[in-house]
Amino acid sequence: MTRPDGGRWRPRRAGGGSAPAPDRAGSSAARLPDRAGRRWSPAGVAALLAPVLLVLLLLGPSLLGLRLFAAGDLIDSRAPWAEASPVEHVRNSCVSDTIDGALPHELTFRDRVAGGDLAPLWDNSASAGIPLAAAPFQGVVSPLFLATLPLPDAAFTGWLKLFEVLVILAGTVAWGRRIGLSVPAGVLGGFLYATGSFMVMWTNWPQSRTAAFFPLLFWAMERIVQDRTVRSALPLPLVITGLVLGGFPAIAVHAVYLAAAYAVVRLVCLNRGTGTRADRAGTATGRPGAAAHRPRPEGAWRRWVKPPLLAAGGGAVAVLLTGFQLLPAAQQLAATDLSRRANAWTATLGWPETVTTVFPQALGTCQTGDARWGTYIPTEGISFVGAGTLVLCLAALTLPAPNGRMRGVRPFLAAGAGLVLAATFLGGPVNYLLHFLPFMDSSGLHRMRGVGGLLLAMLAAVGLDAVARSRRHHGRAAWAGLLTGPVLLVAAAVAAYRLTPGPQEWAQARPGVLFGLVVGLGVAAAWGLVMVGRARATRAVALTVIPLLLAADGLVFASAMWPRTDPAQLYRPTTTDAYLEANLGHERMVGVQWTYWAGAGSVAGLRSLSGHVFVPQDWRDLLLRADKHMFASNTFHSLSSVPALRSPVLDRFAVRYGVADTPTVPPGEFHGDGEQDLARAVTLQDAPGGRTEPAGTPLRGAVVEVVTPVGDVPEAGDPGHLVVEAVAADGEVLAEGRRRLRDGEGGRLTVPVAGEDLARTTEPYTVRVRAEGGPELRVAAAGGAAGAQAGGAWVGTVVGAGDGLSLVATSEAQVYQRTTALPRFRWAQEARACAGVDACAELMGQVPATTVLLPPGDLGEVDLDGQPADVAVAVDQDDYQRVRVRAEGAGVLVVADGFQEDWVARVDGAEVPILRADHAMRGVPVPAGEHVVELSYHPVGWTVLPWVALAAGVGLAAVWVVLVRRDRRGRPG
C-alpha cells in the first residue's frame, strides 16, 4: 500500500501479502524492513544516509587511528609540549576540560587495566585523589567506555563517539516504532540529536556518554506503558544503569524526571481508549502477530496500577545494579564542599544565546583567531538544534498526526521542550519550582538541554512523517506553521546581525547565518512542495531534499566543533616528562599556571598537586593557604606563580618540583636594569649581546628587550630561538638555555638557564645571548653604564637568591627543585596540636620535619617516644601502599595524601585508625619495632554491593529466559 501522494516512507513488500493494519488517521503504519525483497524510497535512503555520512566523513579517519578524536592541538599549546609544537591554530579551544581532566583519567584507567589491574578503584595522580572505577564520576565504568578497552589509545575516543551514535540511533528508532514513526524518521531523529549542541559540544566528557542513553530511556518507559508486562519492564533497569554509569548524574536526573512525566502522559492517553489489550498492543507494539490476540478488557489494576509499579520495580533493580557505584559517590560528595553550587539552579543563559539554536556560531566560534562575543562559554552557551529542525517541529504541531498511535506524544514533546527552554533562558519561577525536586538544585538547570534536545529531535521526526503525509492537508494551521518557520528564521538572522559588535565580527558570523537560513528555508520550501505539488516526482524530490538539508546542517556544525588532530599529539613524551620520571620518586610536582594543564601530567605517570577534580574541603583550605590564587574555578587548581613555590605548606604536601613555561620570568635578583639604551636598537642576529657576572653567581636566566614586537611566527617551520650561554674565560660553555620565539612577543624576553651550579665558579663568566633563525629581532642596545657590554645588544641577568629553589632543567619547561620539600612517606617522632587551617598552616613553617600536626582531640590518643625510624616504601600504588618501618620508639607514619573516607590502615595485618595529620593528610600510629604498614582503599559497600549487582543481573537474565520460554509456549503475557 502506498500513500495517496505516492511516497513510501515505509518499505513495501515485493511479493504481495497483506497490508499493515491502518491507523486512526487512515494511513498505513510504517514498519521496519524485516524481510528480503523490500526496498526504500529515495527519501528514506536520504534519511539513512545522514548517520552514514556522519560516521564516514567525521569519524572514519579516527576509527582507523589516522586522526585523533580529541584536542591534541590544544594540548600542544601548553608547556611542556608547546616548546616543540608545530601547531599553528587550535581547531577547538572550548574543550580544555577534556584534556586536563577527562582524558587523563580515562587513559590512566586504560593503562592500569592493560597492566593487569582489573579494578582500578582510586586515582592518586592528581591533587588529593579521586575515585576512579569505584564511583561513576569519570565515566570509565560506562558500558560504552568499557567497550573501547581493546582499542588503541589513539583510536578509542573515535570509537567511543561511534558507540554513542549507535546507541542513540537504536533508541530513537525503537522509540519511534513504538509510537508509529517510520524507520527513516526515527533514524533522522537520532541523527538530529547526535549532532545537536549537547552531544557535540560535550564530546569526550562523561556528559555525552550519559545522554546517549536518553532515547532508550523513553523507549523503555513507552514499552512498559504499552505492554504492561513483567517482560516489558526488563530493559528499564539496564537503561538506567547505563545512565548512572555514564558519569554525569545531574543530567541523568533530568532525563528520569521527564521520562517519568512522559510515561504518565502516555498512560493517561492510552487508558482513554477502549481499555483492551489489543487496542493498546496490536499495531502499537509493531510485533508480528500482536494484532491477532483476541481483545480482552482490562481492569483498573492492569490499566492504572501495574505500569507504575513495573517502572518503580525497574528503578529499584537499577539501584541494586548500581549501588556499588552510588554509595561511594554519595560519600565522596558528602565529603566535598558543594556550597558553591547551592544556587546553581538559578543560572540561565542570556536571551542572545537563543539565536544559537538555529545559527550555532552566530555569537562566535572556538577556533583560534576567531572572536567570541557570547556571554557564556560556547560549551554551555551554544544551544544548536537546527534551522530545519525548527521548521519540522512546527510541521509536527500544525499538521495532523502521521498515525493514531501517538496520543499525547506531540503535546508532551512540545511542552517538555518548552519547559527546558524556559529553564535555560528564562529561569525565575520555573527554576525555583524545579529546584525543589530531589537532586535538581546542585547543577545548572540549563543543562536540561541534554534531554530537551532529544525532545525537539523526536518532535522533528514526527514532523518529518507528518510532512510526508501532508499532501491533502491544506488547512489554516498547516499554512500558518509553514509560514511561521521562515519568519522566525529571518527574525533570528536579524537578531544575530544586531548582536555582532562590529563589521569584522559580522563577517565572521555571516556565512553560518546564511547557511542556516538556506537550510531552514529549503526545508520549508520542500514542505510546501509536498503539500501543493501535483507531480509524484516533484513530491518525491522534495521529500528527499529535507533529510539531505538536515544532514548538511548537522554535519557542518559537528565538523566545526569536533576536534580531530594528529594522533602524535596525544600527550607526546617530552624531555621534561623524562626528567621528572627519573627524579620525582614518591613525591609530587606542581604546575605553575597552565603548565602540565592541571591533571594532564598524570598521563606520563607524574603525581601532581595540581588537578581538575573535586577536592575535600580541608585539602582545599590548605591549598589556599599555600597560594590564595590556587583555584581558577571550583575544581581547576594549579599554582599561580613561581614565587608561590616558596610556601612551607608545599613542603608538607611533598611537592618536590615546580614546573613553569619557558617564557615565565624566573624568581631572583635582576642585574642590569637601567643599563640599556632605549633610544638605539640593534639587530640581535648581527649584534649579539653579553654581560659579565662575578664568580660564584648562580644564574637563572638572561633578558633582552625587544623594541619591535615579533610578528606571526611559523610554528611548523623554524620559529627561531633565543640562545643563552654562560661562557668561561677560556671559552668553555658552563651552562646553556634556549627558548623559542612566539607570536606577538615584545618587551623584555627572558631565557631560563639552569645555572645554579655556577655558584661554585671561582672566576667571572660571560652571559651571551644570540638569536638563531626565525624573524629579525630588534632589541635595545647596551648603554655606557658600568658592567654593560658596549657595541652590542643589552643583556640583563636573573640570578638565584637563596630562596630554597633550584632551577634544574629548562629544555621544554622550567623545572624548579624545592630543596625544603618533605618526603611523602615520613616518620614523625613528635606531635603538636593545631586547630583550624590557619593555625596549622602557620605551624608548618615553624616545626621540624619530624613533627606531625594533629587535632587537639587526637594528640592525647597517641604516644610518641621521640625516637627516629627508618622508613622504606615497598609498594606505592594508587589505591594500595605498603611501607616497612623500623622504629626505635613509637611514632606516626605520615603519608602526604588526602585524608579520605574508605581508606583502611593496617599494622602487621591489624587494623588501626587513620589520624588526620597536618590538617588534611594521613597519619598511622606505629609502635616501636619492625612493622609492615599497609594503606588500602576499600569503597563503602564494596564488600557486598558488587555481589548484589551480580545477583540482580543474573536474576534479570533468568527472568527474561523464563518469560521468553513461556511466551513461546503461547501463554498469555
Image (cartoon, rainbow, N blue to C red):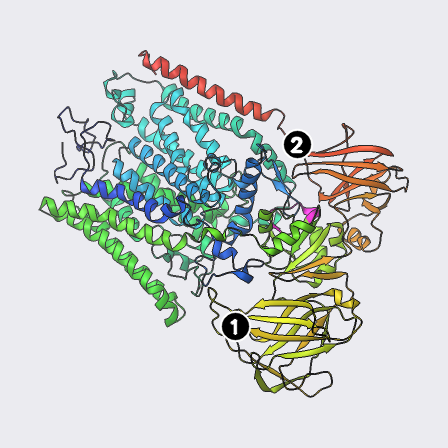
Seen at 46% across and 28% down, the residue is 237
Q: CA distance from mark 2 to mark 1?
A: 57 Å
Q: Which residue is mark 2?
A: 938
Which disc is residue 55 wearing? Answer: none
Seen at 84% across and 55% down, the residue is 846
- The answer to whether residue 320 is visible is yes
Q: Is residue 614 magenta?
A: yes
Q: In the rendered structure, which segment of residues is drawn in magenta? A: 611-619
User: Of discs 2 and 1, which sits in the foreground?
Assistant: 1
| 966 and 51: which is toward the camera | 51
Disc 1 marks a residue whose amino acid type is Gly
The N terminus sits in image quarter: top left
Outermost residue to the left: 535
Residue 249 in percent (x, y) is at 51, 39
Residue 833 in percent (x, y) is at 84, 46
Report if the CB atoms under discs 2 and 1 are less than 8 Å apart: no
Quarter of the image for residue 679 reads bottom right
Seen at 40% across and 43% down, the residue is 63
Which disc is residue 773 wearing? Answer: 1
The C terminus sits in image quarter: top left
Query: How many residues crowd mark 2 within 10 Å: few (<14), some (14–19), many (20+)?
Result: some
Residue 53 in percent (x, y) is at 30, 46
Dot 2 or dot 1: first in sequence order is: 1
Disc 2 marks a residue whose amino acid type is His
| 207 and 40: which is toward the camera | 40
* Image position of 885 (left or right of 356): right
Outermost residue to the front: 730
Residue 731 in percent (x, y) is at 69, 74
Q: Is residue 231 above or below residue 655?
A: above
Quarter of the image for residue 469 reads top left
